[in-house]
Image: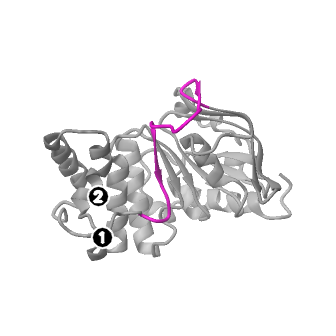
Amino acid sequence: MTAVLKNAVTFEAVGAKAAAPTVISFRDVSKSFTVKGVTKQASHSINVDIQQGQVVTIIGPSGCGKSTLLNMVAGLFAPTTGEVVYRGEPVSGINGRTGYMTQSDHLLPWRDVASNIATPLEIQGVPKAQRQARIAELMALVGLTGNEKAYPSQLSGGMRKRAALARLLAYDPETLLMDEPFAALDAQLRLRMQTELFKLSRQLKKTVLFVTHDLDEAVALGDRCLIFSGRPGTIVRDVPIPLGDDRNILQLRKDPRYHELCGDLWEFITPDHDA
């Protein structure tokens, strides 16, 4: 293990962002599901705090409770034991201060791009003039200006993801919950979307929880990385990623620190690693 991680396996060692207010707290959280009379534990003993403005990536084997973690923050699932706290209050229902993005873009095929982005604004009852101004702002933000009238079937994979991201940002959620949103993209498109997300998360000061199976992606995007054990999952490592807010995603592959951090994550998740 390299020195950069050996002496700092918790985020507090990184520095500046550790002083930010805590947005999300998991307090001894466990989650079980009962299907056809059989109860299975997805995760256990989750204890972690997420600070405002952090991008926290989450890795671990399939079925270890990574997505369940996001669902509990969103208020879609309640913990079986323990407590999920958001801004000092227990999450007891749908958490309207979060936005969720999954592998599927879930764009409505009968609506053009502008109308898709408008959907959450319409639900909120935002007046038409304000909606149109917000849509134009978001289209420019994600680089889709000029494609307002295009339908999802007319868009490339990357453009669909941009549209989905714009819709996610439309109602300005404080925290973005992202469950492998770029997994289906080819390498080039994934890199472009990583760059866009990183830029927007800093520009808009969003807190992000990002589930991925790609260790390179976990390092490229994160301020820290939570590593889960196998099912029932728990956090076995909380790894700082001290690459800075000014990192250039496109140039990271030339940075020896990046390769060092990727190597350490590989070491942590190997089956014979002593966690």
- The reply, left or right, for residue 60 in relation to residue 198 is right
**Mark 2 sits on what residue?**
116
Asked if 264 appears above or below 223 in the picture, the reply is below
Q: Which residue is mark 1?
A: 152
From the viewer's perspective, is residue 110 above or below residue 173?
Answer: below
Give the quarter of the image for residue 265: bottom right
Give, as a single range, the part of the protein colored magenta: 85-105
Mark earlier in primary sequence (1, 2): 2
Left or right: 73 as drawn, with respect to 192: right
Give the main secondary structure of the magenta stretch.
loop
Taking the view exactly as shown, the residue that stands out farthest to the left is: 129
Question: Measuring 33% from the left and 42% from the top, which residue is drawn there?
Answer: 171
Occupied quadrant, residue 90: top right
Q: CB atoms at circles 1 and 2 under 8 Å apart?
A: yes
In this rendering, would 270 be left or right of 177? right
Look at 54% across and 42% down and name the residue there.
74
Secondary structure state at the residue bearing disc 1: helix
The amino acid sitting under disc 2 is Asn
